[in-house]
Amino acid sequence: MFALFLAAYLLTAPTLMGIVVIMLLTADLFSAQHIAIAAVAGAAIGVPVAWLVARKLEHIFDVKRN
């Protein structure tokens, strides 16, 4: 499960970080502090998303093995 979680996190965290930073740039918030906070928030949001993706993938792979 941890390997799937890590792989999912490596894909979801940068994606969510980029989405949040682009949202800020679209809202004309160009300060470095806002962008850094948005990147950390995207990384934090990526943890539960990656956990859900890893759990779903593990369930799919376990069902196909049986």
Image (cartoon, rainbow, N blue to C red):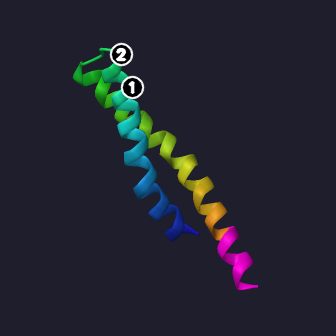
In the rendered structure, the answer to whether residue 52 lies left or right of residue 43 reads right
Residue count near mark 2 (Cα–Cα under 10 Å), binned few <14, some 14–19, many ≥20 = few
Residue at 24% across, 18% down:
31
Q: Amino acid at mark 1?
A: Met
Q: Picture coordinates of residue 53 (x, y %)?
A: 59, 57
Q: Amino acid at mark 2?
A: Ala
SS class of the residue under badge 1? helix
Identify residue for label 2: 27
In the rendered structure, the answer to whether residue 42 lies left or right of residue 60 reads left
* Mark 2–mark 1 distance (CA, rounded to whole Å): 6 Å
State yes or no: residue 64 in magenta. yes
**Magenta extent:** 59-66
Q: Which mark is residue 59?
A: none
Q: Picture coordinates of residue 2 (x, y %)?
A: 54, 67
- Assign the C terminus to one quadrant of the image: bottom right
Q: Picture coordinates of residue 24 (x, y %)?
A: 35, 22
Work out whether residue 27 or residue 1 is closer to the camera in this orientation and state it. 27
Identify residue for label 1: 23
Work out whether residue 2 or residue 62 is closer to the camera in this orientation and state it. 62
